[in-house]
Image (cartoon, rainbow, N blue to C red):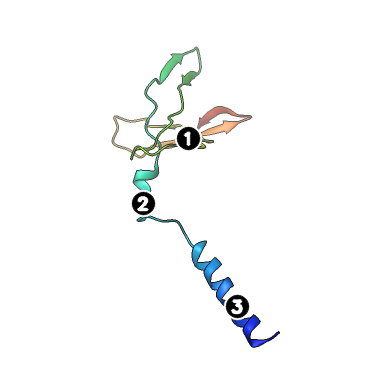
Amino acid sequence: MSPRARLAAGVLLATLSLAACGRKGPPAAPEARVPRAAGDLAVVVRASTIELSWTNPTRRVDGTPLRDLTLARVFRVDDAGGGEPKPAMQVDGRIAGYT
């Protein structure tokens, strides 16, 4: 490979590397990236279960659009609100208990 071709390849590689590096704009805090809370949460109490339903939010806390919400985590607290939330245990896509 000639020196001129090496130089051209190096410049091209450097240009492509810099152009594809990251995204424009300041970094966002993780707290701003979380989805907004569901506004229409409904609860139905059955004999031995509680059924929750809601509409997934379409925007994040900072107002930016939420494109692909694929997971919702349900937490519960078994005290007066002073303890840490505990995640629900799922079996076959249904809540089977809590940790």
Of all residues shown, which one is farthest toward the top?
A: 47
Give the mark nearest the N terminus, 2 or 3.
3
Label 1: element kind: loop
Residue 63: x percent and y percent?
35, 37
What label sits on residue 28 in the rendered view? 2
Instruction: From this view, report whether residue 84 is shown above or below residue 17.
Output: above
- 12 vs 22, left or right, is right
Whether pointer 3 and pointer 1 mark residues with C-beta atoms closer than 8 Å, the reply is: no
Residue 6, how many percent across, how many down?
63, 82
Quick one: label 1, few (<14), some, or many (20+) residues within 10 Å?
few
Q: Nearer the viewer, mark 2 or mark 3?
A: 3
**Foreground of the two, 30 or 15:** 15
26 versus 17 height, above or below: above
CA distance for labels 2 and 3: 36 Å
Q: Residues within 10 Å of mark 3 (few under 14, many from 20)?
A: few
Name the residue rendered at 53%, 34% in the picture.
89
Kindly indicate the quadrant of the structure image that contains residue 58: top left
Tag 3 secondary structure: helix
Q: Amino acid at mark 1?
A: Arg
Q: Amino acid at mark 3?
A: Ala
Q: Which is more N-terminal, label 1 or label 2?
A: 2
* Picture disc at residue 73: 1
Residue placed at 40% from the left, 34% from the top? 59
Q: Quadrant of residue 70?
A: top right
Mark 3 and mark 1: Cα distance apart in space: 51 Å
Residue 61: mark: none
User: Viewer-proximal residue, 17 or 55?
Assistant: 17
Q: Is residue 71 left or right of residue 6?
A: left
Mark 2 lies on a secondary structure that is loop
| Residue under numbered circle 3 | 8
Residue drawn at 30 percent across, 32 percent down:
81
